[in-house]
Image (cartoon, grey):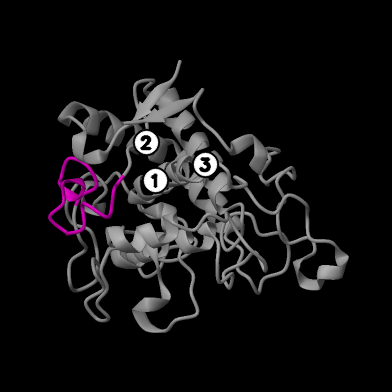
Amino acid sequence: MVYTRKNQARLTSAEKRRFVNAVLELKRTGEYDEFVRTHVEYYVSDGDPGLRVAHMTPSFLPWHRRFLLEFERALQRVDSAVSVPYWDWTVDRTADASLWGSGLMGGNGRRSDRQVMTGPFARTNGHWVVKEGETGGDFLMRDFGRPQNPTELPTPGQLDWAMRDPVYDTPPWDSTSPQGYRNKLEGWTSNTGNDKWRNHNRVHRWVGGHMLGGASVNDPVFWLNHSFVDLLWDRWQARHPHSAPYLPDEPPDADNGPLHGRVAARHEPMPPWEATPDELLGHRGIYRYA
């Protein structure tokens, strides 16, 4: 049966409560921390050896689509009515947006140590203890807008700049790719200061705290961000129906030197699963967006 992922701003109080309760149950059993460990393991940077599948690579979008599905299936084993909502950060762009209410994500971290003190994921409530990628404490941290070096969430215009690109990805298939939808959406650039981060990356930077780096799954807002990124890939495909939905089609060969063995081509498996990018190009038989 096809289920629906909804904009978090349109969730009812009951839907928020069921989503939060399912997330907390995964945390209680230890399953949630397995998702954190998976993301840390596969957060491989340009300069690191081995295959990159999660970030700075063409498979950024299909890998996270599968990651979201695995998480959603875990939630649905707790409560079959739950799905992962999405956060449209081009609309809900302030610390006063509904997702930061006490019934969903909770609010910002306090000034002294960035510890989140409100909502269901506050350490003081006893249900959310950070165990993986701990940095300075076992509590969830946020730092909205990074006041020490202020930044803003992406604007509709900045997102549209990415959405207009009709090419999925381009060589060298990493964080330095100057063109291509994937990197423009993921958000790596050669700029300096806050202009270095675009779209998806800027969202992580704006939330701050645990949303920085490979252990970002420690903050449950990670899933709402990536649910929206997944929706945006859907919209891009609809906007560019004649474009190749994924590139590269073939793996870079040995003549490509450092690119060889580092990028998942369209029909190559993405660890830790056997799924290929080609198998994750659509989702219409599984879920839809509202």
Residue 11 sits above or below residue 188 on the image: above
Residue name at image x 34 percent, y 21 percent: 81
- Looking at this view, is 120 or 222 the one in front? 222
Q: Is residue 6 inside the magenta stretch?
A: no
Q: Pointer 1 and pointer 3: residues touching (CB < 8 Å)?
A: no
Circle 2 is placed at which residue position? Answer: 84
Mark 2 touching mark 1, by CB under 8 A? yes
Judging by the rendered image, the residue that carries numbered circle 1 is: 223
For the point 24% across and 71% down, the residue is 113
Mark 1 and mark 3: Cα distance apart in space: 11 Å
Q: Residue at point 87% right, 69% down?
A: 255
Number of other residues with Cα within 10 Å of mark 3, as a class: few under 14, some 14 to 19, many 20 or more: many
- Judged from this view, the residue extending furthest toward the bottom is 192
Q: Main secondary structure of the magenta part?
A: loop
- The front one of 34 and 281 is 281
State whether residue 205 is above or below residue 264: below
Q: Nearer the viewer, mark 3 or mark 2?
A: 3
The residues tagged by marks 2 and 1 sit, at their Cα atoms, a distance apart of: 7 Å
Q: Quadrant of the N terminus?
A: top left
Q: Amino acid at mark 2?
A: Val
The image shows residue 108, relative to residue 113, as above or below, that is above
First in residue order: circle 3 vs circle 2: 3
Amino acid on which the number 3 mark rests in the picture: Arg
Q: Is residue 210 visible?
A: no
Q: Residue furthest right?
A: 254
Q: Which residue position holds label 3? A: 65
Identify the magenta region.
87-106
Instruction: Determine the image quadrant of residue 79.
Output: top left
- Return the disc, 2 or 1, that comes first in the chain's sequence: 2
